[in-house]
Amino acid sequence: MILVTGATGYIGSHTWVELLNAGYKVLGIDNFCNSSRKVLDRVEKITGQKSQFIEGDMLDEKFLSSLFRNNPIESVIHFAGLKSVGESIKIPISHYQNNIHGLLNLLKVMQENQCNKFVFSSSATVYHPNNLIPYVEGMSLGSTNPYGWSKYMSEQILRDIEVADTSWSVAYLRYFNPIGAHESGLIGDDPKGVPNNLMPFITQVAVGRREYLSIFGDDWPTPDGTGIRDYIHVVDLARGHIKALDYLINQKQSLTINLGTGQGYSVLDLVKSFEKVSGKKIHYQIVERRPGDIAQFYANSQLAKKLLDWTVEYDVDRMCKDSWRWQLKNPNGFGE
């Protein structure tokens, strides 16, 4: 059985679907702080399988102990945690408490139950911003915000555990900017409050929930002055987690890999692509740069191709098209 933490979140729900489609037995957990209960029915509708789910919090060690005691969990894919760069700068304690304390609770209980295969949801934000692009796995690490530091610290905790106990196998998946949605339009990105990420902001403008898109600076050292990122379809990303899990099971050794397309797109590139596939005009305003941002980054994903035989299937137009289908079918997200 595979335990998926943060199972009803954006990336967690898409990975849950891919795991079930691949034949894995999955147990999902979440506390719904950034997700909806409606995801449970949607996952069942997409896969045609009954979802196994238990509500609970990563900060509750007694809950985690009971979970492992009562279920034959063999591996863990860990998504649970806070993920907003901007919010992490405003309320760093909450991010460190959730992302570090929650991880420590989980690892302690895993160790007590001899469960030692772990797929970790890391981030490209662990790379030092002074690195040349594209980012390669062996580059120097660092961050510009508490969210990135929480991922950096989490990686270090896991590496220390590996040194202390060589039975552990960990996949450190440093992924870039997931967008898109399942082709059914049943699950997608539904942030609470004002979106911190670009694509849900664009789709909410397109569907009429917001008047305009705020673009954080047009004076970055990039061709059009807006920030450049490596946008990856969330389904491609989810399938990368399956490949990484298979690697841990079969190779019984750890790996650190980037999951990205290797192609950078600016904010305005993404706006133009979305306008093309949706037929909607996206009104935007240039506002001040956001603390913690950097001009550009994108991945070198050759190691993922070499070790996992993983490559992306979907281009940026498909990412925009699937994002728009999700928002069009769910103008108020999950409606909560």
Image: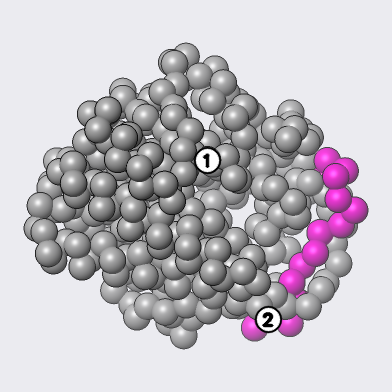
The image quadrant of residue 324 is: top right
Sort mark 1 into few (<14), some (14-19) or many (20+) by Cα contacts within 10 Å: some
Out of 96 and 123, give the one closest to the viewer.
96
The local crowd at label 2, few if under 14, some if 14 to 19, many if 20 or more residues have their Cα within 10 Å, is some
Asked whether the viewer can see residue 47, the reply is yes
Marks 1 and 2 close (CB-CB < 8 Å)? no
Residue furthest to the right in view is: 211
SS class of the residue under badge 1? Answer: loop
Q: Quadrant of the N terminus?
A: top left
Name the residue nearer the viewer: 210 or 318: 210
The quadrant of the picture occupied by the C terminus is top right
Toward the front, the furthest residue is: 62
Instruction: Tell me which amino acid carries mark 1.
Output: Asn
Q: Which mark is residue 31?
A: 1
- Tell me where the magenta segment starts and ends, as one range: 206-225
Question: Disc 2 marks which residue?
Answer: 220
Residue 192 in the image, given as x and y percentages of width and height? 70, 48
In-image side of 248 versus 62 (left or right)? left
